[in-house]
């Protein structure tokens, strides 16, 4: 039986797992050539010269440069926005509102009756700022959200308290490979697991088969518990976000 956290990661980030299997040197690190040299270091954007291999930003084409600059600009905009710790993970509840589309029903059951899930969604403010979470809301729940985030409007909405924006650090790190290097990629990957663990425990799904106790955001105590964990994860994520911003600073002058 698949694990619900693994189910999420493979669904959203299917492109990135191969990049975890091999170590990549980041920009600024020179590797002494040893035989046999791994094939990944023998092709662009790595360059071999005088017995060393290193990344060469001059090999960055214009399209890739613009994509990495967009990523860095999004990370900066997210960093500089005030965090919101009042969402209490209701996006997962809004996704299964009215029970027409239960996204993970093949992986794990719901822990509450549908009527109780619907009642919570209707009784609490929906303040989701993340497009990739919002777009999976049940159609009836989307108009209830305070924001109507769009794909193109991500830099105008994403904020550093958001569980999904912080999980996305792994996505952006993967898309920025090999420039940011494997060490930062692994750190973002491990953080995404911790974030998704909280996300799923606070959801209406029953994770008891995997030994996960729910964060019962349908109660005041559960919402306090969620916020405490969310704040701690956001603090760690802020450091990773800054490391990504710093690692991508070369695109400003490349």
Image (spheres, helix red, strand yellow):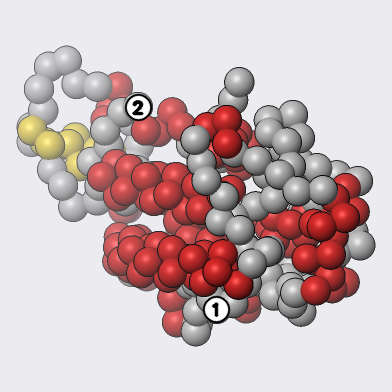
Residue depicted at 84% across the width and 64% down the height: 119
- Give the total of numbered labels: 2
For residue 75, side relative to residue 247 (left or right): right
List x then y, in percent, for residue 83: 50, 79
**Secondary structure found at label 2:** loop
Against 234, residue 139 (above or below) is above
Q: Secondary structure at mark 1?
A: loop
Which residue corresponds to mark 1? 84
Residue 1, by quadrant, is top right
At x 56%, y 64%, the residue is 222
Which residue is depicted at the point 80% across and 42% down? 102
Residue hosting label 2? 21
In the image, is residue 228 above or below residue 29?
below
In this view of the protein, can residue 95 be seen by the observer?
yes
Report which quarter residue 108 is drawn in: top right
Q: Are marks 2 and 1 in contact (CB under 8 Å)?
A: no
**Residue 248 showing in the rendered view:** no
Indicate the position of residue 173 as horizontal and vertical percent values: 41, 51
Spatial separation of the CA atoms under disc 2 and disc 1: 35 Å
Q: Quadrant of the C terminus?
A: bottom left
Compared across the picture, whether 74 is left or right of 234 comes to right
Q: Say few, some or many: other residues with alpha carbon within 10 Å of mark 1 (under 14 / 14 to 19 / 20 or more).
A: some
Sooner in the amino-acid sequence: mark 2 or mark 1? 2
In the displayed structure, 81 sits above or below 224; it is below
Q: Is residue 212 left or right of residue 92?
A: left
Observer-nearest residue: 161 or 207?
A: 207
Residue 82 place in picture, x, y as percent: 49, 84
């Amino acid at each position: 039986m698949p694990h619900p956290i693994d189910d999420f990661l493979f669904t959203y980030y299917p492109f990135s797992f191969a990049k975890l299997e091999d170590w990549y040197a980041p920009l600024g690190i020179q590797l002494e050539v040893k035989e046999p040299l791994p094939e990944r270091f023998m092709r662009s954007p790595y360059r071999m010269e005088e017995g060393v291999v290193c990344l060469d930003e001059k090999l960055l084409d214009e399209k890739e440069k613009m994509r990495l600059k967009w990523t860095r600009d999004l990370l900066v905009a997210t960093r500089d926005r005030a965090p919101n710790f009042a969402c209490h993970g209701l996006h997962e509840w809004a996704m299964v509102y009215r029970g027409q589309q239960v996204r993970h029903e093949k992986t794990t059951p719901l822990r509450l009756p549908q009527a109780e899930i619907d009642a919570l969604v209707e009784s609490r403010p929906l303040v989701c700022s993340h497009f990739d979470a919002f777009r999976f809301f049940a159609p009836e729940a989307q108009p209830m959200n305070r924001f109507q985030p769009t794909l193109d409007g991500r830099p105008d909405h994403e904020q550093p308290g958001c569980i999904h924006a912080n999980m996305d650090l792994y996505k952006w790190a993967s898309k920025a490979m090999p420039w940011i290097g494997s060490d930062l990629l692994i750190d973002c990957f491990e953080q995404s697991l911790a974030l998704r663990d909280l996300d799923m425990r606070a959801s209406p799904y029953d994770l008891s088969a995997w030994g996960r106790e729910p964060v019962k955001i349908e109660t005041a105590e559960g919402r306090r518990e969620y916020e405490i964990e969310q704040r701690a994860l956001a603090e760690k994520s802020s450091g990773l976000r800054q490391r990504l911003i710093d690692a991508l600073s070369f695109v400003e002058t490349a």
